[in-house]
Amino acid sequence: MTVKVPTFPTSELCVQCGGMCCRYGSGLFLPRDVPGPRPLTVESLREFCRERKTVVYAEYIYGYYSKPQLMLRPRQADACTLDQCVHLTASGCALGDLRPTGCKSLEVIRADRCVQRMGTSGDGVFAARSWRRYQPQLRELAKEDGFSW
Ligand code: SF4
Ligand code: SF4
């Protein structure tokens, strides 16, 4: 599939690349991406997941946390393999400016190399810290989807 990525930061390299980051995964949302009053509730997170085709994702962050840390990311076409994000279309990201902070923070260094720049301690750690207070709510949502962490 030839993919244009017009909603990415203006980068000819992204257009040439064809959205590799979206074709083999999806970026992480942070709590600040979720609209509505604070603190976020199970209901507001559930609604956000429904609207943005998003699921609870568990990441093992060795050396920082003994348990997997729960976060949100857009669904992938096949959750069991490195598959493409459900928001990837032939004309780019269907979410546009509503795409995850993790997607917006990708910085292209050169044609075959880009990095995420969400936080100085590494993106997984930064995202895990951001979602820390919402672990009970995310666990509840994961249970509804048949997962238990
Ligand atoms: S951010 Fe990187 S992986 Fe994603 S489309 Fe641009 S160059 Fe490709
Ligand atoms: S939300 Fe958009 S930018 Fe992020 S991985 Fe999916 S298609 Fe790519």
Image: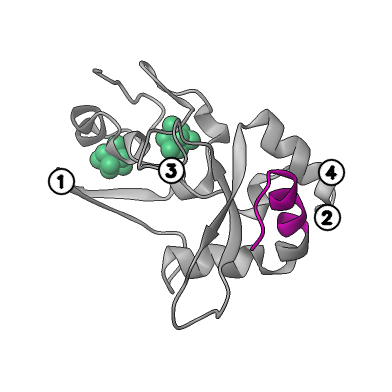
Q: Are marks 4 and 1 in contact (CB under 8 Å)?
A: no
- Label 4 Cα crowd, 10 Å radius (few <14 / some 14-19 / many 20+): few
The residue type indicated by label 4 comes to: Glu
Q: Are marks 2 and 1 in contact (CB under 8 Å)?
A: no
Q: Are marks 4 and 2 in contact (CB under 8 Å)?
A: no
Q: Which residues are magenta?
A: 137-149
Q: Is residue 72 magenta?
A: no
Front position among marks 4 and 2? 4
Q: CA distance from mark 3 to mark 4?
A: 26 Å
- Label 1 Cα crowd, 10 Å radius (few <14 / some 14-19 / many 20+): few
Q: Residue at x 58, y 34 (%)?
A: 98
Q: Secondary structure at mark 1?
A: loop
Q: CA distance from mark 1 to mark 3?
A: 25 Å
Looking at this view, name the residue that lies furthest to the bottom.
63
- Reading the image, the residue beneath label 2 is 38
The residue type indicated by label 2 comes to: Arg
Pointer 2 or 1: first along the chain: 2
Pointer 4 or 1: first along the chain: 4
Q: Residue at x 54, y 79 (%)?
A: 65
Q: CA distance from mark 3 to mark 2?
A: 32 Å
Q: CA distance from mark 4 to mark 2?
A: 12 Å
